[in-house]
């Protein structure tokens, strides 16, 4: 049994967010972190590893420095890593990204007993799409918004959260589960783990490695294979300059509500 | 960018400890100070992460990293909580070091893994009449068959109520010149005749509960002797060398933590229609302080690096401790001033940092003692 | 079946997936239909609701009242409770046969599970969590003028463009992005609940709405997950850190503490549900428990909306809330420092202004 955990390196948006003049994100000036929800997926996998002794493999797609992120996870107890990196994969939207990651997992070999864990969504895009789309490409079932995962052989019982309650869902391996913050508290690295993290193995999957996979075609990967394009990106009008609404009557509150509506705040 | 002087793994230890400090230690720092609560859970988290055992061998339950990594970890803890840093320094910096250095194979195998897991060991040297001058020590250990019978009391023992074990230095005889001879013992907390007094009410590091150890016909097996009989001062002095790097780093962390808090504050606080960070007084003072803190850090890294290389480091440790503890006082006093009236309240952590800083000039050898050590080393007769 | 998502011109009509739970429609359905109505008008196309469930035919007229010309109903016991497998299969079958140009879903926990799975199967793009939709370029440019810092005059827009322009926040609202899906159909989008405006119920449209029963083709092998049980629970939000909306009170409520607190709660409800916050003065006076405190010694919030009622804005409070996305301050003193960090400010007595604001919010919904 092996658990693939999909992780993403993202800009740390909790601090100051730097924006270029053209309205795109100035990634170079921001520090990167491992996407928070992905850490819950990692913990879920390590928890199962504690119980079953299974192998935990972290999978990420990104530029070569993302290897350092995989080492960070090794220091927590992850066994090995797959880094998917190629110029041909650049500019992929969620559709193309999931296509490539699904191909990589196929290439590594997804067995009957295996699981794929993802975070619910990444803080840079907030789309929550890659997980379900990987599942679709691999033709395996998915359960999203997992707040509890219990495993008994090939049967997995997941508590799947909704806004107004939850479902208990039964599913068989192989399957894909997306994890939310309520699921667990990610463990810390250990100093021993840090000492050994450069001894563990990172496999690099470039275009050459994956091109024979059926899911990899020129029109399904990279910028060219992405159905969605950014048409315009822009910054909302500057915050910080207060707009004082004069009067303290119904007209004022109506105006306020209208303004909030126009800016899609409510 | 002194980070470039470190290896990737040393940086990872620093970042790991930073994360634990921010998530676990900082949020309760004010409360454990105010209510004098021992931060048991924080110590357990640090133990699980392998930070207590950081510089000790993996086969003894440690993490097998270097002492410099441990120094980086202490600074991160001290930046947010002087109490927790103090506990870690005494236990992992002083007591574990003594066991590793002087313990028999059996003692190391018994105590080191437990200590790495967070079973704390105190270090008991000071007495009411034996502070900087240990010749006034009154606690005695008298040989009785294969046992020693200990009587007396030790003062100002860090983490006393939480310690599972203590290293205790007692008088075991007199030498030819009539001077007392000392021996170190490892004493488990449930040893008959051993008890712990009530914690003293302190100015700072109030979460590190400090109390008296009392020995009333306390019977200890001779297998609990640490090091050689009659050579207890050697244990004490060795402990002080490593301890001084740690306590110096605690001081460094407090100073850096104070600067960090101040920068955040002066960047937000507006007076006379300007952020106070824009006043030249603010810029010059903080620039001076940060420069000194960086210099202080280099003194400690030098001592730690020498220790990792197996070279003598006692004088360098004394310098690091002397400089950084004075600096912690200077920094916290000057930083608090930027907070004005707010700084004097418990709304902000800066007053706690000021109180926590003071002990670093006093314990692990007062700064006057450090100057004596350094004075001797530079060739003064 | 001749389904080719790249044959863009063969797709038409605007579809809205109408989510129901326990036979009850969701507010988002009405918001999406109201928006879809406008898009259908812009394209001269039909607005079609897609309703899956068991015994849900009775809901069709309600959907019609919010603008659906037609509702496709897939009625089957296996669709009573949402499962990814069954819903994806049924929706994709219908889409592949009927080829809608646009398919909108609510960005609920269900819509965000279903949308990406369908998009992957249909080989098309999906834009998540949209807050604004346009088809006509003139309307989009008008929107940019209001909601962006772009110099729209300086940009040459192709006024003939008829792609669905889907705008969404990114990076916690620091950036906005408009996404298009030019080469494939349907254009799919999940839309953030509570953001689009719901129209008034129209009885005539309700009567005119056409119901179409669509055959459900499911086999056992399509269904790989099993729902063992479903549990309803309304979770009370006391979590300031994760809150989307925080309404905080300060010393300004001292005139009538109970009234002040209850007004704050009512306002939070009117804003779609939120958490009650407070300044330190309120905690120190014992008016609220310490877990409500925002600021230096309390919690740091990053909510979408932060309303400060009768809070002067001392530095130790401001440091805990200045990163909220939209700050609304109501204070009697026009020189209160809270206005320096606010997005919108009203000078006035909170006991007078808040009830009016609640009224305005209720009327707007």
Image: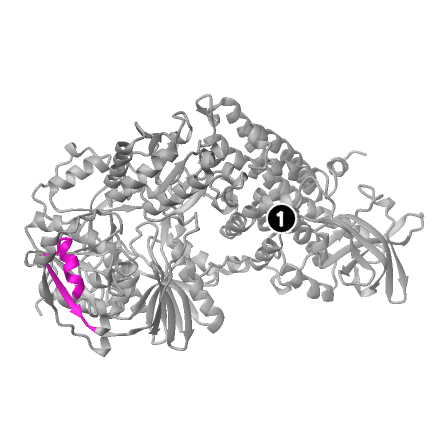
Question: In this rendering, is residue C80 above or below A260?
Answer: below
Taking the magenta stretch, the answer to whether it contains residue C152 is no
| Residue at figure coordinates x 9%, y 56% from the top left | C13
B245 relative to A151 in the view: left or right: right
Question: In this rendering, is residue B289 above or below A79?
Answer: above
C195 relative to C283 in the view: left or right: left
Q: Quadrant of the N terminus of chain C?
A: bottom left
Question: In this rendering, is residue C305 above or below C33?
Answer: above
| Residue at figure coordinates x 79%, y 54% from the top left | B168
Report the front residue among C66 and C313: C66
Report the front residue among A173 and A138: A173
C71 relative to A41 in the view: left or right: left
Looking at the rendering, which quadrant does residue B135 occupy?
Answer: top right
Report the front residue among A63 and B152: B152
Residue A24 visible in the current orientation: no
* Spot occupied by residue B28 in the image (x, y as percentages of width and height): 57, 47
Q: Residues within 10 Å of mark 1 (few under 14, many from 20)?
A: many
Looking at the rendering, which quadrant does residue B222 occupy?
Answer: bottom right
Would you name the residue on which mark 1 appears?
B84
Looking at the rendering, which quadrant does residue A148 occupy?
Answer: bottom left
Taking the magenta stretch, the answer to whether it contains residue C72 is yes
* Spot occupied by residue A153 in the image (x, y as percentages of width and height): 41, 78
* Spot occupied by residue C68 in the image (x, y as percentages of width and height): 12, 56
| Residue at figure coordinates x 48%, y 63% from the top left | A77
Report the front residue among B153 and C79: C79
Q: Which residues are magenta?
A: C58-76
* Spot occupied by residue C125 in the image (x, y as percentages of width and height): 19, 56
A194 relative to B87 in the view: left or right: left
The subunit letter for the residue under badge 1 reads B
Q: How many numbered marks does the figure carry?
A: 1
Residue B297 visible in the current orientation: yes
Secondary element at image label 1: helix
């Amino acid at each position: 049994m092996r658990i693939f955990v999909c992780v993403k390196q993202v800009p740390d948006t909790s601090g100051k967010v730097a924006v270029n003049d053209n309205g795109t994100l100035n990634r170079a000036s921001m520090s990167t972190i491992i996407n928070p929800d992905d850490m819950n997926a990692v913990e879920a996998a390590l928890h199962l590893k504690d119980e079953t002794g299974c192998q935990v493999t972290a999978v990420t797609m990104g530029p070569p420095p993302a290897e350092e992120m995989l080492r960070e996870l090794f220091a927590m107890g992850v066994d090995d890593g797959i880094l998917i990196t190629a110029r041909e994969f650049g500019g992929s939207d969620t559709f193309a990204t999931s296509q490539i990651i699904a191909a990589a997992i196929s290439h590594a070999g997804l067995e009957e007993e295996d699981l794929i864990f993802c975070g619910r969504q990444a803080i840079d895009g907030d789309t929550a799409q890659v997980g379900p789309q990987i599942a679709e490409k691999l033709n395996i079932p998915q359960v999203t918004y997992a707040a509890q995962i219990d495993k008994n052989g090939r049967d997995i019982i997941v508590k799947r959260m909704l806004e107004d309650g939850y479902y208990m869902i039964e599913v068989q391996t192989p399957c894909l589960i997306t994890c939310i913050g309520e699921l667990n508290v990610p463990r810390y690295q250990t100093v021993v783990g840090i000492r050994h993290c450069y001894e563990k193995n990172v496999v690099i999957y470039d275009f050459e490695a994956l091109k024979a996979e059926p899911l990899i075609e020129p029109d399904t990967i990279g910028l060219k294979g992405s159905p969605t394009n950014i048409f315009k990106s822009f910054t909302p009008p500057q915050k910080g300059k207060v707009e004082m609404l004069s009067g303290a009557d119904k007209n004022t509150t109506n105006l306020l509500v209208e303004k909030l509506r126009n800016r899609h705040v409510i | 960018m002194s980070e470039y002087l470190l290896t990737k793994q040393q940086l990872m230890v620093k970042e790991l400890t930073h994360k634990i400090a921010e998530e676990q230690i900082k949020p309760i720092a004010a409360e454990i100070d105010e209510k004098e609560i021992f931060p048991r859970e924080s110590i357990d988290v640090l133990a699980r992460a392998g930070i207590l055992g950081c510089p000790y061998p993996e086969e003894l339950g440690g993490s097998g990293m270097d002492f410099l990594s441990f120094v980086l970890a202490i600074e991160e803890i001290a930046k947010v909580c002087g109490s927790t840093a103090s506990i870690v320094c005494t236990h992992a910096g002083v007591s574990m070091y003594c066991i590793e250095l002087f313990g028999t194979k059996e003692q190391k195998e018994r105590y080191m893994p437990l200590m790495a897991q967070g079973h704390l060991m105190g270090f008991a040297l000071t007495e009411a009449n034996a502070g900087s001058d240990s010749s006034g020590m009154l606690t005695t250990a008298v040989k009785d068959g294969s046992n020693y019978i200990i009587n007396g009391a030790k003062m100002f023992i860090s983490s006393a109520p939480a310690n599972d074990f203590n290293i205790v230095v007692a008088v075991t005889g007199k030498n030819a010149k009539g001077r007392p001879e000392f021996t170190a013992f490892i004493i488990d907390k449930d040893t008959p005749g051993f008890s712990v007094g009530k914690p003293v009410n302190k100015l700072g590091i109030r979460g590190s509960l400090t109390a008296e150890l009392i020995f009333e016909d306390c019977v200890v097996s001779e297998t609990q002797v640490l090091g050689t009989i009659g050579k207890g001062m050697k244990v004490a002095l060795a402990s002080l060398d490593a301890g001084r790097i740690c306590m110096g780093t605690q001081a460094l962390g407090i100073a850096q933590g104070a600067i960090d808090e101040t920068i955040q504050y002066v960047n937000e606080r507006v007076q006379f229609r300007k952020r106070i960070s824009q006043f030249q007084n603010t810029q010059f003072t903080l620039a001076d302080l940060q420069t000194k803190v960086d210099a202080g850090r280099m003194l400690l890294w030098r001592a730690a690096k020498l220790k990792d290389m197996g070279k003598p480091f006692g004088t360098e440790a004394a310098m690091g401790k002397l400089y950084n503890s004075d600096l912690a006082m200077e920094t916290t006093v000057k930083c608090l001033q930027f907070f004005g009236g707010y700084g004097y309240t418990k709304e902000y952590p800066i007053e706690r940092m000021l109180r926590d800083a003071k002990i670093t000039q006093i314990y692990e050898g007062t700064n006057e003692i450090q100057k004596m050590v350094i004075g001797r080393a530079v060739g003064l007769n | 079946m001749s389904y080719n998502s790249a044959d863009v011109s063969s797709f038409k009509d605007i579809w809205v997936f109408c989510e129901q739970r326990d036979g009850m429609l969701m507010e988002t359905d009405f918001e999406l239909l109201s928006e879809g109505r406008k898009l259908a008008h812009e394209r001269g196309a039909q607005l079609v609701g897609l309703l899956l469930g068991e015994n849900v035919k009775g809901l069709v007229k309600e959907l019609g009242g919010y603008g659906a010309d037609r509702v496709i109903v897939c009625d089957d016991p296996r669709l009573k409770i949402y499962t990814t497998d069954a819903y994806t299969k049924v929706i994709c079958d219908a889409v592949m046969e009927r080829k809608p140009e646009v398919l909108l879903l609510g960005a609920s926990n269900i819509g965000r599970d279903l949308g990406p799975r369908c998009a992957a199967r249909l080989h098309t793009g999906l834009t998540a969590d949209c807050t604004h939709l346009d088809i006509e370029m003139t309307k989009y440019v008008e929107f940019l003028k209001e909601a962006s810092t772009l110099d729209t005059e300086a940009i040459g827009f192709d006024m003939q463009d008829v792609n669905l322009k889907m705008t969404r926040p990114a990076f916690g609202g620091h950036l906005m992005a408009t996404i298009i899906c030019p080469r494939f159909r349907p254009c799919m989008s999940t839309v953030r609940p509570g953001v689009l405006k719901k129209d008034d119920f129209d009885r005539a449209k309700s009567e005119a709405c056409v119901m179409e029963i669509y055959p459900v083709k499911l086999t056992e092998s399509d269904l790989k997950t099993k729902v063992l049980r479903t549990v309803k629970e309304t979770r009370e939000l006391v979590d300031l850190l994760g809150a989307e909306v925080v309404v905080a009170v300060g010393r300004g409520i001292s005139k009538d503490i109970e009234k002040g607190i209850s007004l704050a709660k009512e306002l939070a409800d009117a804003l779609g549900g939120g958490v009650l916050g407070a300044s330190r003065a309120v905690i120190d006076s014992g008016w609220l428990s310490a877990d409500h405190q925002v600021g230096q010694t309390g919690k740091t919030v990053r909510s979408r909306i932060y309303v400060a009622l009768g809070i002067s804005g001392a530095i130790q409070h401001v440091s805990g809330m200045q990163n909220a996305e939209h700050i609304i301050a109501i204070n009697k003193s026009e020189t209160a420092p809270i206005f320096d960090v606010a997005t919108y400010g009203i000078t006035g007595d909170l006991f007078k202004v808040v009830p009016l604001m609640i009224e305005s919010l209720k009327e707007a919904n």
